Amino acid sequence: MELIEYPDAEMMMMALGDDIAGQLKGHLLTNDSVSFAVPGGTTPGPVFDVLCSNKSIDWSRVNVMLTDERRVPEDHERSNTRLVKNRLLVDAAAAANYVSYLPDGPDANIEELSKRVEPHLPISVMLLGMGADMHTASIFPNSPDLETALNTLYPLVTVQPPDGLEPRISLSATALKSAINCHVVIIGAEKRAALERAQSLTPAEAPIAAILDEATVHWAES
């Protein structure tokens, strides 16, 4: 794991956005298309703001997917798809291809849904967050789906979060670990302490531990 510390979150988001842009352009030099996996939530929004206006990226050759999504309508306030379409896939980045893997109906056939993701693996560049409970994407400690999420060979997994909120579909640990470039962004002393705990725990205890060996972690205190 590489840890980069920043004086403040604003500087971190700008630097991280520039790093990701450089990596996307680097992959595009040798590939017809690239994949970019991103989280939902509030933390990555400023990174999206930096990236979406970058006209030096050939966004028409970038396939954007979420690292996880709640099974809610796209216009729902908790929809990660809504966030990405409103915050990242605008301006120059509106030309990117959005890869959706939510099922059209109530049933989720992971084998079939995985076929939407598999052409874009391994992920070229991936951005992840981490919760204070050391979850990442929607791979939660104490979830009834934890073992499957960590061990399935499919790139997707259905998840019932332990908090009892909306069921989700997430990239599995197999897909996360395959990413060529992996970034984790966290803010605050609580998450820094959680990160340090995770380094001595197993993925079953701290799911973020599944990808730390391959990750660059970006941290600012506030």
Image: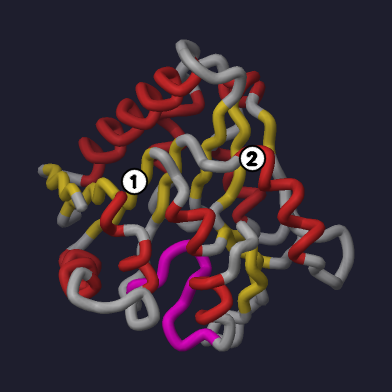
What is the CA distance from the residue labelled 1 to the residue labelled 2? 21 Å
> Is residue 175 highlighted in magenta?
no
Residue 183 versus residue 53: which sits nearer the camera? 183
Query: Residue 115: where, in percent of width, then height?
Result: 76, 50
Q: Identity of the amino acid at label 1?
A: His
Where, quadrant-wise, is the C terminus in this rendering? bottom left
Residue 74 versus residue 102: which sits nearer the camera? 102
Residue 78 in sight here: no
Q: Is residue 193 above or below residue 47?
A: below
Query: Residue 185: where, in percent of width, then height?
Result: 31, 51
Mark 1 secondary-structure assignment: strand
Residue at label 2? Answer: 85
Q: Is residue 134 above or below residue 54?
A: below
Q: Which mark is residue 26?
A: none
Q: Is residue 114 left or right of residue 144?
A: right
Q: Which residues are magenta?
A: 134-143
Residue at label 1? Answer: 183
Residue at 34%, 82% in the rendered image: 205
Residue at 46%, 49% in the rendered image: 178
